[in-house]
Amino acid sequence: MIYFAYDADMNPAQIAERCPGYRTLGVARLTDHRLTFPRFSRTWGCAAASITPSRNDTVFGVLYQVPEEDVLALNYQHGYDPDGPRELNRDELRAVTVLKVGGSEPVAAVTYVAVPDGTGALPSAAYMNAIIDGARTHGLPRAYLVVLNAVRTG
């Protein structure tokens, strides 16, 4: 599965724990979406990241190749149960663009999108630091790092 991570899964330590067989494919951009925090995460004890359609906005992230033997663990960590109640939906994206030196190319990828729970919680500083560390590690654009650093935490 090609997985578009825009949250703490960009952090190499977290993705390695969840998906030991992962392989990084590159930095990616999802247009006409923005980063939001609509659901409380029991794992992090704060609001967790999601994406929401938003004209003229962009979310940057990382594309991973996740082997089939790691997909069930990734689904579990994200609260995605195809046969039961879901905290997140698993969406297929057709417009993720892999950014490469000398150009870019569109690819299909899967990502997780939170089902809003209405708690109004904020992300914690620790959670945002995990996202920002992952973004820096993978060389996401400076302008996007500014956006991440500006997220209000609680």
Image: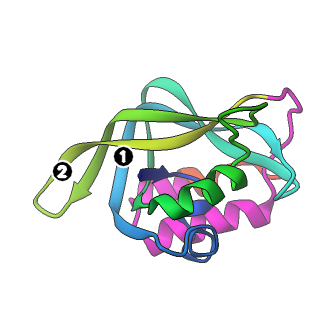
- Name the residue type under label 2: Ser
Q: Secondary structure at mark 1?
A: strand
Please state which of residues 131 and 26 is positioned toward the viewer in this rendering: 26
Query: In this rendering, is residue 1 above or below 23?
Result: above
Magenta-colored stretch includes residue 91: no
Q: Where does the image place residue 46, in percent across and percent down from the top left?
A: 84, 51
Which SS type dominates the magenta stretch? Answer: helix
Residue range of the region highlighted in magenta in the rendering: 117-146
Mark 2 surroundings within 10 Å by alpha-carbon count, few (fewer than 14), some (14 through 19), many (20 or more): few
Q: Secondary structure at mark 2?
A: strand
Where does label 2 land, which residue? 104
Query: In this rendering, is residue 5 above or below 90?
Result: below
- Name the residue type under label 1: Arg
In the rendered structure, are the residues bearing label 2 and label 1 in contact, judged by CB atoms less than 8 Å apart? yes
Which coloring applies here? rainbow
* Disc 2 from disc 1: Cα separation: 10 Å
Where does label 1 land, which residue? 29
Please state which of residues 124 and 65 is positioned toward the viewer in this rendering: 65
